């Protein structure tokens, strides 16, 4: 079984705090076989990470901000524009051959998709049933139950925005250690989500920092 964190942000994300190098080093130290780099609305972090020599396999990807919420697309190295309708984004991502994961479906306030959940789950390949950054832990259980109900594979990711938390969400995957084998194993539900929650303290500190940044940006815009 491979140990994979399928949801990691680098400092190529507007709110990521750690370099690709630090993240890969931490991932290796934590015994991960693969990580998916899914920065917000950019593939630059993925492209950069793919060039690095590491024992940890890099799965390239992106976390797209659709009009109705976030969507993870794995296995692509081309950007998908932000701000499109969720289903239009799904169409474009499929055209590019990406694997689609619905992240943190119960995180409305943090961009969980604001459309009927069944419709969103139907449109993707897998559901993130463990995200280490939920403040209410039961949201993961709810997501897992929904995914099972609609017959979708379940995956886990840390959603780490700092190298310290890489590996807090781990999907055990029955696959060979290469991107196409991992993606097809996810499609076949050969996955087992596990993980531990990101400590609330650090998460709150980060949220505060982001909020402060947003306020500063707003003030500058005036
Ligand atoms: Zn997200
Ligand atoms: Zn994320």
Image (spheres, rainbow, N blue to C red):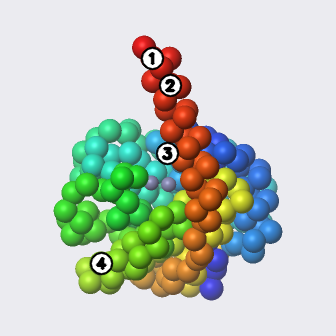
Q: CA distance from mark 2 to mark 1?
A: 6 Å
- Characterize the local packing of mark 4: few (<14), some (14-19) or many (20 or more) Cα atoms within 10 angstroms: some
Instruction: Give SS at disc 1.
Output: helix
**Residue highlighted by disc 2:** 217
CB of residue at label 3: within 8 Å of ligand 2?
yes
**Residue highlighted by disc 1:** 221
Question: Foreground mark, 3 or 1?
Answer: 1
- Characterize the local packing of mark 3: few (<14), some (14-19) or many (20 or more) Cα atoms within 10 angstroms: many
**Sequence-first disc among 1 and 4:** 4
Question: Foreground mark, 4 or 2?
Answer: 2
- Report the quarter where the C terminus lies: top left
Residue 213 at what x, y percent from top left? Answer: 55, 32
- What residue sits 70% from the left and 72% below the top? 32
Q: CA distance from mark 1 to mark 4?
A: 41 Å
Q: Is residue 200 visible?
A: yes
Please indicate whether residue 32 sits to the left or right of residue 112 in the image.
right
- Characterize the local packing of mark 1: few (<14), some (14-19) or many (20 or more) Cα atoms within 10 angstroms: few
Of 5 and 207, the residue lying toward us: 207
Question: Which residue ends up furthest to the top in the rendered image?
Answer: 222
Q: Is disc 1 in contact with disc 4, using a CB cutoff of under 8 Å?
A: no
Q: CA distance from mark 2 to mark 3?
A: 18 Å
Q: Is residue 178 visible?
A: no
Instruction: Give SS at disc 4.
Output: helix
**Residue highlighted by disc 4:** 146
Quarter of the rendering containing residue 126 = bottom left
**Sequence-first disc among 4 and 3:** 3
Q: CA distance from mark 4 to mark 2?
A: 38 Å
**Residue highlighted by disc 3:** 40
Residue 137 at what x, y percent from top left? Answer: 46, 73
- What residue sits 48% from the left and 59% below the top? 74
- What residue sits 40% from the left and 52% below the top? 110
């Amino acid at each position: 079984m491979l140990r994979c964190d399928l949801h990691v942000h680098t400092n190529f994300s507007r709110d990521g705090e750690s370099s690709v190098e630090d993240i890969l080093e931490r991932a290796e130290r934590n015994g991960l076989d693969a990580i998916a780099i899914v920065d917000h609305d950019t593939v630059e972090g993925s492209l950069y990470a793919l060039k690095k020599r590491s024992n940890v396999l890099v799965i390239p990807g992106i976390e797209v901000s659709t009009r109705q919420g976030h969507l993870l697309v794995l296995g692509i190295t081309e950007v998908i524009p932000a701000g499109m309708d969720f289903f239009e984004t799904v169409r474009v991502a499929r055209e590019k051959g990406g694997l689609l994961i619905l992240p943190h479906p119960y995180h409305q306030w943090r961009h969980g998709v604001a459309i009927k959940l069944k419709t969103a789950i139907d449109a993707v390949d897998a559901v993130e049933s463990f995200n280490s950054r939920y403040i209410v832990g039961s949201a993961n259980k709810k997501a897992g139950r929904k995914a099972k109900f609609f017959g979708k594979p379940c995956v886990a990711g840390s959603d780490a925005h700092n190298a310290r938390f890489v590996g807090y969400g781990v999907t055990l995957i029955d696959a060979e250690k290469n991107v196409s084998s991992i993606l097809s194993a996810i499609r076949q539900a050969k996955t087992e989500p596990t993980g531990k929650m990101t400590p609330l303290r650090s998460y709150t500190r980060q949220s505060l920092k982001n909020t402060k940044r947003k306020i500063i940006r707003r003030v500058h815009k005036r």
